[in-house]
Amino acid sequence: MKRTGILGRLGLAAALLLAGFSATLARADDRARAILVLDASGSMWGQIDGKAKWDIARAAVDRLVTGWDPAIDLGLTVYGHRTKGSCDDIEDVMPVGPVDPAKLKAAIAKISPKGKTPLTAAVRRAAEALKYTENAATVILVSDGEETCDLDPCAIASELEARGVGFTAHVIGFDIRDEAAKAQLKCIADNTGGTFVLADDAASLQNALTAVAAATAAPTPTPPAPAPAPAKGRTSFSAVYAPGAPVEDKDLRWGVYLDVPGQEDLGQPVASHYSAHWTPGDPIPPGDYIVVASLGAASVQQPVKITGEKQEIVLDLGAAVVLPAIRESETGPLIATEVAWKIHDMTDREVGYSFKPEPDFTVPAGSYRLTARYGDAKGEATFDVKPGEKPRVVITLGSGTVEAEVRPSAGEAPATDGVSWKVFAENSGDSLTYSYKGNPVFHLTAGTYRITATIGEATGESTVTVTPGETTKLSLVLGVGLLKPVAIFAPGAPKPTKDLSWQIFPAATDLAGNRGEMVAYSYDLTPSFKLPAGQYFVKVTTGIAEASAEIEVKAGAALAPELNLNAGAIVAKATLGAKPEGDYSWKIYRTIAAITGVEREQVSYAYDAAPIWIVPAGTYVVELKMGDAVAEAEVTVEAGKPAPVTLTLP
């Protein structure tokens, strides 16, 4: 009789994570409720295998909601997608409720990552939306980096746990390379009784989200207290990797199913448990059953007849336990920090993964390929295992470490934030990896690399040679100066409050008077440009008024030049006599002296009922048309002052 095992139906990744995402979901009116908090900060434009992380995450969420159980309510909160540099950029994109896959996908499709990472505030906001002080509440956080808004996620996670009825945060760290970021995200899960999972590519992210969905739909029963010693009439269960090699792993999962003739699927278990040795507290009635034992990637099912008498049932997993470890060089120590492990069978099917330094994989006897990634250094090994074996598989990466720092200028301390790092293979224009830390640590395969650091518009680079087992120190000095220009309408006048456009160009011009390509731009009222030392041309524009200046930026110095727009405002309104029909059509003309006399040059227009124009000081003609009706008036604009004008249509 053909049977489908538990792991076959649930999927290996979901089975590995199911216990961690167990029965902690918020419920109201017997409906499961949760909120997915999704990172849309600027770093989500980073790439994995040539594809933006945001596109990978969006596709994973799309697939997740397509198969979402309609009996489970879900909400979506996103942060870092609307404003650069804002710690308040958190949006409840979808309230908690029945999932509309098409609507949710359409909402995510409109999101474009750009900002900071206020993940702590986003988790707290989601907890409050679930009324965590009144109901059990579960938040699922997917993030690719650490908190950047000066909150302590560990402390706030503890606070939510302490104040909540039953608050839990499960955290999926996506493409996390930095150890501090990993520790910070893991702390959120640890302090709330949640599970922390690392995903390093599209497949593992999908596996993690699939596991969350499986746990939401069918939470794992809480394992019962240890059963008393076997008594007369009780059935006991144990397993061996091979005859003479007993299983002592507490994560061994048991399931007992009715053996129904003609039924292909196992159905629901009549009893289940996690333990190496199991004697059910409630005796299983006599009858025919299928017993399933699963550990890691190994699973065995066996028909048994339970007699009601004392029985000892032993299942043979026919499995081995693989014990991996890695080192950077042949003589170096084993690496004791997190490593991304994957194990595949010879059909290239992934049968397990882990982020422990020295994990253990339980697999059926056979041939396997083991891969390890430590930072951006990768290694692999192939091997065969027999039942009952516990081989030690050590991979030598042939890699070294680069510890980097960057100083904005020679007299400044190393930068702690606002830095963008990229690592390139020698003679390659495609980056291998990146970081936004002030002092990142890169683990790289031995070789020669070009490493760049960027602060604002200044970039420096250096070539380093990585030697197996050795640490290379890299320190860059960029020679950055700070430019903070200010625009005014006129001395003593109120400053502009909106609609400024700033452009920075090299000061040098060619023979035709043209400047080089634009170096930087901003639409802020008081922008802050970090520029390499040198000569620049700064221009600010608002309305049709503009001001410019040539300035010199010096390394390690701040410069705040004041640019005088010498401009005022034309404030127009209209009164309608006979109420002509049509739309408002305004034009502004500047009078110029020409060989033919005084002529008009159109400088602006509008279609509003009461427009306002920012213009250089001077004399202008304001014209209003509505249908065939026309009115105009001359107005003189003084710098820093409004010039009201009212036109009356006949």
Image: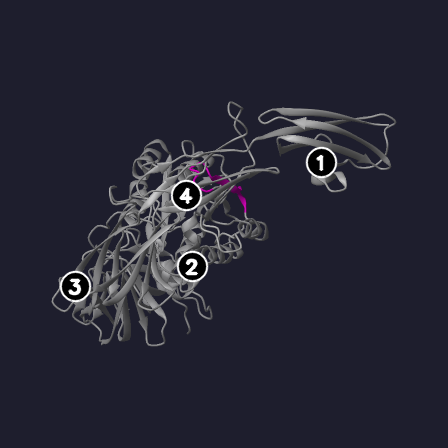
Amino acid type assigned to the residue bearing label 4 in the image:
Lys
N-term-proximal mark, 4 vs 1: 4
Residue 469: numbered disc: 3
Task: Report the Cα–Cα distance between label 3 and label 4.
Answer: 35 Å
Which stretch did the figure color magenta?
Answer: 84-98
Kindly check if marks 2 and 3 are in contact, taking CB atoms under 8 A apart as contact. Answer: no
Which is more foreground, mark 4 or mark 1?
A: 1
Q: Is residue 10 visible?
A: yes
Closer to the chain start, of discs 3 and 1, is: 3
Q: Which mark is residue 206?
A: 2
Secondary structure predominantly adopted by residues drawn in magenta: strand
- Residue lying furthest front: 595
Nearest to the eye among marks 2 and 4: give it.
4
**Which residue in the protein does label 4 denote?**
116
The image quadrant that residue 375 belongs to is bottom left
Confirm whether the magenta stretch covers residue 256: no
Element type at mark 1? strand
> For this rendering, which residue is in front, 432 or 40?
432
Q: Residues within 10 Å of mark 2 (few under 14, many from 20)?
A: many
Q: Quadrant of the C terminus?
A: top right
Q: Residue at x 53, y 24 (%)?
A: 494
Q: Which residue is mark 1?
A: 591
Question: Which amino acid, by three-letter code, is at mark 2?
Answer: Gln
